[in-house]
Amino acid sequence: MSEIEQAMDEKLSTILHVDMDAFYASVAEKDNPALRGKALVVGAGARGVVLSANYEARKFGIRAAMPVGRAQRMAPHAIFVAPDHHRYSEVSEVVMEIFRSVSPLVEPLSLDEAFIDVTGAKRLLGTGREIAESIRAQVFKSEGITCSVGIATTKFIAKLASDRCKPNGVLEIAHDRVLEFLHPLPVSAVWGVGPKTAEELMKLGLRTVEDIAKTPRATLIRALGEATGAHLYELAWGRDYRDVVPDEPDKSISNAETFASDIEDTEILLRELLRLTEKATHRMRESNKSARTISIKVRFADFKTISRSKTVPLPI
């Protein structure tokens, strides 16, 4: 690497996306090693939903948010265990502290994943890959569970990279290799592209991210609307200007879920709402807090968002 290239490289951000592998199932296996190597599903009650499935269970098509009853039919021999949210919070707290020991710029996305900006840590701790490997080793030594890490100069590409090195892997996408990595991917790889948007893109003859990138921005906006069209065009060129935003003391407690595909089944949505409500109220009890306002926010495939709130007279 020339001095000029090295200077340019040092100016670029180095962002990690760390995602625990089958986190809830991995915690159950950690606490009961006899479960290792067996198809394991976290979720109880025929009318409940699957919170997590280990990789043995996923071979049978079992996925998170699936009704437990359906998962039982798909893999009758699988072991089903009830969720233990208190335990997940304990392990997550340890893992997040490991992340913060590397960099103060940690943006948790959920209990089991986070972005970490390690740009300022490289002079002391080594390259992005060396830092990623150190994090993985510390997590495994401390908690006996594995994680996958994507490394890139943007959050979008780092997340794509971690998705593609699971389980228990590291994938670094250099700045000058972003388009080589990104463009062959299917359009569904882009954040915000669910089945409906993918169908609209297919009507335009767009099947890969490269197809989106080579389509005029104005064409995408006409077909998909201003927000979605512009959003997809920028991401198709690997452009993502969002910073890693460290978490601050909670003024609110929330849980959210982005589905891999658009969901129209009301029963599935209600089950997911119940699951998220249980997680949020558990966190509220754990932190000894109460609230007066309850809000629900829904974001559609076209990025339109609606929300509803209810404020009660006394804290609950």
Image (cartoon, grey):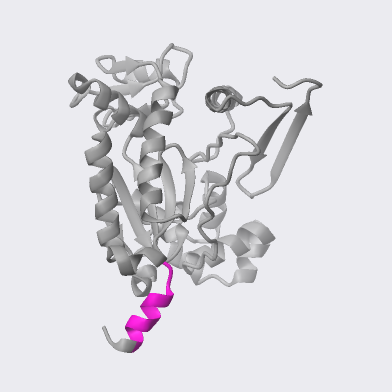
- Residue at x 24% of width, y 15% of height: 77
Which of 222 and 30 lies nearest the eye of the viewer? 30
Residue 207 seen: no
Image vertical order of residue 207 relative to residue 64, above or below: below
Residue lying at 58% horizontally and 72% vertically, measured from the top left: 216
Residue 71, image quadrant: top left
Would residue 29 be found to the left or right of residue 225 on screen?
Answer: left
Q: Quadrant of residue 5?
A: bottom left
Q: Nearer the viewer, residue 41 or 119?
A: 119
Question: x and y percent of residue 145 in the render?
Answer: 26, 36
Magenta stretch containing residue 11, yes or no? yes
Q: Main secondary structure of the magenta part?
A: helix
Q: Residue furthest top?
A: 45
Left or right: 53 with respect to 105?
A: left
Is 118 displayed left or right of 227 in the figure?
left
Indicate the position of residue 285 as horizontal and vertical percent values: 56, 22
* x 48%, y 45%: residue: 108
Q: Percent x, y for residue 189? A: 43, 53
Residue 315, quarter of the rendered image: top right
> Which quarter shows the N terminus?
bottom left
Q: Quadrant of the C terminus?
A: top right
Residue 157: x, y in percent?
A: 42, 60
- For residue 230: magenta? no
Q: Which residues are magenta?
A: 4-13
Left or right of 193: which side holds 79? left
Establish if 282 lies above or below 170.
Answer: above
Query: Looking at this rendering, what residue extends furthest in the right direction?
Result: 313
Camera sees residue 230: yes
